Amino acid sequence: MSTLNFNQGSKAIYLKYYGLLEKRRWSMDEALNWSQITVKTEDKELLEMFYVASLIETYTFTTTPNFLKQHKDKPWIIALQIDRGYEECKHGNALWRYLEAQEYPCNDTKISEIQDVPDPYTEMSLFERNVYAWLSEVETTIFYRKISEQLIEPEGKKLLALISQDERVHGAFLYDTILLELKLQPNLFADLQGFLQAYQDPNKESHYGVAVGSETFQKIRAWASQQGLNEEVGGFIQQKVNNLAKEIGLAA
Ligand SMILES: [Fe+2]
Ligand SMILES: [Fe+2]
C-alpha cells in the first residue's frame, strides 16, 4: 500500500473528524456537578466496573506512545491517535475522580501494573491494529451505555453517557480508516474476517486480566454478556462489515 495514497485518504478522514471532535469536547469540571455526587449503595457493584474501566483507559499511556513511534510517517493518523489518546486519558481520570467522590477504595499502584503489561498492538500491522481498536471502541460504546442505564447516581450516569459518545466517535474514524485501507488494498478483506473470528475468542484482551486480575476481568465480561453486550456488538459489527464489503465491491 502506498503511504502517499494512505496519507491523502487519512487527511480527509482527519479533516472530517477534527471539527466534530473539537465541537463536542466536554470539560470534566463543567459536565458534572461534582459536589452533588452522593454514595448510593445500589451502585456498589457497578463501581467495580468503573474502577476496572479507569485502569483500562489509562493503558493509552502505553499504547499511544508506541503508536506514535511506529507511524511517524503518517501525520493525519497520528493526529487522530493523539486526539483519541487525549480523550482516553480524560475518561480514565474522570472515572477515577468519580470513584474518589463515591468513596470507592482505589489506589494508584495498579496504574503502573497495567503499564507493565506488554502492548499486544506493537506486533500488528496498522490494519490489524485498527480493526482491533475499532472492535474495542464499539464494545466500549455499548458497555459504558449499559452501565449508564443501570447506575442510579445521576452524575455518574451523565459521565458514562459522555464517555460512551466519545467512544462512538473513535469507532467511527477507525471504521473510516479501515475502509480507506480496504479501498487501497482490497485483499485485506480476507484478513478482516480472520480478525473478527479471533475477536470472538473469550480470552481476547486477556492481557488486561494481568493487571486487573483475571477473575475481576472475567466477572465484568460475564456481567456484560448478561446485559446482551455480545449480541449487540455482534449485530452492529456484522452490519458494518457488510457495508465495508459493499463499499469495496465485494457484496453479492
Ligand atoms: Fe475511553
Ligand atoms: Fe475510545
Image: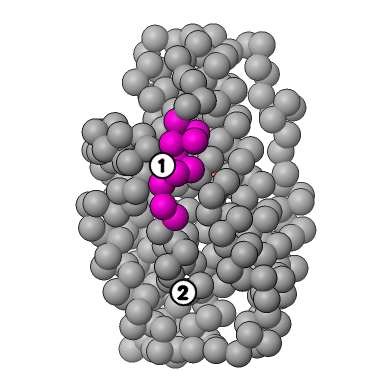
Residue 227 shown in magenta: no
Choose mark 1 or mark 2, whichever is in front.
Answer: 2
Is 194 rendered above or below residue 210? below
Q: Is residue 30 visible?
A: yes
- Measured as percent of width and height from the top left, residue 2 is found at 60, 90
Quadrant in the rendering for residue 147? top left
Mark 2, Cα crowd under 10 Å, few <14 / some 14-19 / many 20+, is few
The residue pinned by badge 2 equals 125
Q: Is residue 185 left or right of residue 93?
A: left
Disc 1 versus disc 2: distance between alpha carbons?
Answer: 27 Å
Q: Is residue 219 left or right of residue 19?
A: left
User: Upstream in the sequence, badge 1 or badge 2?
Assistant: 2
Image quarter (top left, top right, bottom left or bottom right) of the C terminus: bottom left
- Measured as percent of width and height from the top left, residue 124 is found at 43, 70
Numbered label tally? 2
Q: Disc 1 on helix, strand or loop?
A: helix
- x 68%, y 80%: residue: 7
Image quarter (top left, top right, bottom left or bottom right) of the N terminus: bottom right
- Measured as percent of width and height from the top left, residue 109 is found at 47, 27
Residue 115 shown in magenta: yes
- x 71%, y 71%: residue: 75
Asked whether 95 or 124 is in front, the reply is: 124
- Measured as percent of width and height from the top left, residue 200 is found at 26, 59
- Give the residue type that dot 1 points to: Phe
Mark 1, Cα crowd under 10 Å, few <14 / some 14-19 / many 20+, is many
Q: Is residue 120 left or right of residue 35?
A: left
- x 56%, y 79%: residue: 180
Is 103 rendered above or below residue 94? above
The residue pinned by badge 1 equals 143
- Give the residue type that dot 2 points to: Ser
- x 57%, y 62%: residue: 67
The segment highlighted magenta reads 110-119
